[in-house]
Amino acid sequence: MAEVPRREGKRKLDGDSVENPFQYVIKTFIGEDGEEYYDSDDDEIRYADGGRVSVRLQKEYNRQIRESEGFDITLDLELGTSFSAYFSTHRGKENKIPIFLDLAQKAIEHFNSEHNTNYKFVKNVTVNTSTAAGIWCYITFLATDATDTDDPNAPKTFQALAWWGVDEKTEVRFCRLKKQDDKKPLDSDVDVKAMQ
């Protein structure tokens, strides 16, 4: 990625010199070559509360969200609100927060009813959330099928998108088997139904 040349820390704004980097916004744009560029005096994005993150890490975070549809965010940062993290990871809490367990259980029940199977929930692997008048939960979990003739104890990995509203109503948008050998995520059964 080509970078816009540095401007030595000062930017003119309405005729005044801006010394404080917390007073302006980092602007990004897509160049003619399709690459994302940023217009900044710094290699970091700085937030009003003093939080900082490098542009490189912000882009990696966004890439992981985009490529995994929100399910596989492996970037280990203390994101918090200062990062403007529209996805939050819940490492170490996947199996401790009751609503995550409840949503995964509902997701496997949804999958079983849609595919006439008998999978049983084992445990959550990862949970990522996105907030909007409630919480979208991107849950990766393990489940087994006792009727599986190949290996009834071998857990399979599932991905589910579930909603937990501010009114505490829940809904499973989709539940699918996670494709093991391909980095591209499977299309959700919602997308498959829409194409039929």
Image: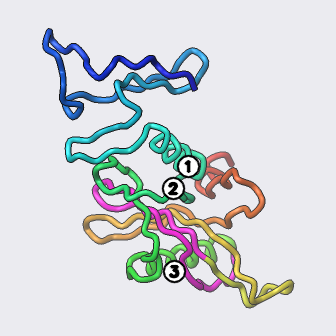
Q: Is mark 1 on a helix, strand or loop?
A: helix
Front tag of 1 and 3: 1
Front tag of 2 and 1: 2
Image-based side of 191 in relation to 24, left or right: right
Q: Which amino acid does label 1 sit on?
A: Gln
Cβ–Cβ below 8 Å for labels 1 and 3?
A: no
Residue 27 location, quadrant: top left
Q: Which of marks 2 and 1 is nearer the N terminus?
A: 1
Label ID, residue 105: 3
- Residue linked to disc 2: 75
Front tag of 2 and 3: 2
- The residues colored magenta run 116-141
Q: Is 174 drawn above or below residue 187 in the view shown?
A: below
Cβ–Cβ below 8 Å for labels 2 and 1?
A: yes
Q: Which of marks 2 and 3 is nearer the N terminus?
A: 2
- Residue linked to disc 1: 64
Image-based side of 139 in relation to 148, left or right: left
Q: Is 101 drawn above or below residue 159 in the view shown?
A: below
3D distance between C-alphas at marks 2 and 1:
8 Å
The residue drawn where x is 75% and y is 55% is 182
3D distance between C-alphas at marks 2 and 3:
27 Å
Residue 108 location, quadrant: bottom right
The residue drawn where x is 52% and y is 49% is 65
